Image (cartoon, rainbow, N blue to C red):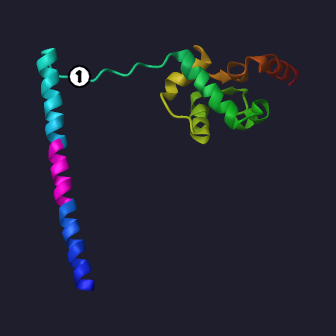
Amino acid sequence: VNAKWSQQYATIQKESARRRQALSAVRDRLRTSCAAMSVILAGKPPQRTPREEPSPSFLASAFRKVLKRHYPFLQREWQAMDTNDDGRLTFAEFLPLCRRIGFEGPLRKVFEAVARGKQWIELGDIEPELAGGQQRAEEEA
C-alpha cells in the first residue's frame, strides 16, 4: 500500500513540476508579447512613468497625523523629543523621532515642510493652537 501511495505521490510531483514549467513559459511569452506590442503601437519602447512627488503640505500633514496618533498629549512629550531642551527640534533630533514613531519617507523634505524655512521645528509648527502656550512658558522661564 505504501509503495502504491509513494508512486502516486511521485507522479503528482512530476505533473506539478511540468505544469509549473509550462506556466512559466507562457508568462515569459506573454511578457515578451506585451512589450513587443507596446513598441509596435507606440513606436518606442515602454517607459515607466515617474511617481509624482507629494506636495510639502501633504508631507507636513502626514507627519503631524502620525505624530499626534503616537503622542496624543504632544505638549507633555515635547520635552522628551527635544533632547537638548532648547524648545526646538533640529533635524538631528527629528530623525530619531521619526524612527520611534515609524514614520518613513523623504525625511529631509518632511522636516523642511514642517519647519517652513527654519532650521528647527517648534511645537507651534506641529500644533498651532499650542504655539501661544509655548511662548508663555519660555517667557516665564
The relative height of residue 119 versus residue 68 in the rendered view (above or below) is: above
Judge whether 8 appears above or below 53 on screen.
Answer: below
Image location (x, y in percent) of residue 104? 51, 34
Look at the image and give the residue range highlighted in magenta.
17-26
In which quarter of the view is residue 86 placed? Answer: top right
Residue 22 is a magenta residue: yes
Foreground residue among 56 and 52: 52
Residue beneath the point at 73% across and 17% down: 128
Residue 82 seen: no
* One can see residue 56 in this view: yes
Front residue (pair 124, 15):
15
Q: As rendered, which of 125 and 135 lies closer to the eye?
A: 125
Q: Which residue is mark 1?
A: 47
29, above or below 22, in the image: above
Q: Is residue 16 left or right of residue 100?
A: left
**x 11%, y 19%: residue:** 40
Q: Main secondary structure of the magenta part?
A: helix
Q: Please state which amino acid type lies under the numbered disc 1.
A: Gln
Q: Position of residue 73 (x, y in %)?
A: 78, 33
